[in-house]
Image (spheres, helix red, strand yellow):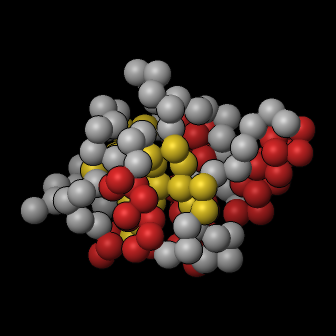
């Protein structure tokens, strides 16, 4: 049985992390900073490995708008700016929610998102405040 933290019910798209991540809740601002690739480590210093679906994937669009309060193109602009200026890199892209689940489950420090029905006990749900 997978327990979903209180506060995770407002959206069917959940923030998920590798089971070794010891952070269990993030604010919207911190989550936005991580997905914009501005915050690159967890509070304990471990590197965050960010995974996202393609920009045109409906779940990516919903995650960006509902959970981060930004549009997908705004995230892409931030990633492009960092890549082209040499100050950072874009997140890792996966092609499907099944691939997202697999990557998060097997990559230490990984963070991503998926719809509730794809969730299993190989990953943990991170509550958003």
Q: Is residue 35 above or below residue 64?
A: above
The residue lying at 68 percent from left, 70 percent from top is 55
Residue closer to the observer: 77 or 51:
51
What's the residue at 89%, 38% (across, down)? 85
Residue at position x 83%, y 51% in the image: 80
The single residue placed furthest to the top in the displayed view is 44
Q: Please state the horizontal and vertical placement of residue 6, each as a whole percent of the image.
A: 24, 49
Q: Residue 103, image x and y in percent?
A: 42, 59
From what the image shows, is residue 84 above or below residue 54? above
Residue furthest toward the left? 1
Query: Which residue of the protein is positioned furthest toward the front in this rendering?
Result: 106
Q: Quadrant of residue 94?
A: bottom right
Does 83 sit above or below residue 8? above
Which quadrant is home to the C terminus? top left
Residue 38 placed where, x, y %? 67, 35
Q: Quadrant of the N terminus?
A: bottom left
Q: Is residue 32 left or right of residue 110?
A: right
Q: Is residue 128 visible?
A: no
Residue at image point 50% right, 32% down = 47
Among all residues in the image, which is located at the extreme right? 85
Looking at the picture, tell me which residue is in the foreground, 31 or 42: 42
Classify residue 101 by image quadrant: bottom left
Percent of width and height locating residue 8: 32, 55
The answer to whether residue 14 of the structure is visible from this angle is: yes
């Amino acid at each position: 049985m997978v327990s979903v933290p209180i506060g995770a019910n407002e959206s069917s798209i959940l923030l998920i992390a590798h089971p070794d991540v010891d952070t269990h809740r993030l604010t919207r601002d911190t989550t936005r900073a991580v997905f914009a690739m501005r915050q690159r480590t967890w509070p304990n210093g471990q590197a965050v490995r960010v995974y996202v679906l393609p920009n045109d994937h409906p779940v990516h669009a919903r995650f960006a708008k509902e959970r981060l309060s930004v549009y997908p193109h705004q995230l892409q602009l931030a990633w492009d700016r960092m890549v082209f200026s040499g100050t950072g890199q874009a997140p890792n892209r996966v092609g499907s929610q099944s691939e997202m689940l697999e990557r998060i489950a097997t990559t230490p420090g990984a963070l991503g998102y998926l719809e509730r029905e794809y969730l299993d006990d190989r990953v943990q749900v991170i509550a958003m405040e």
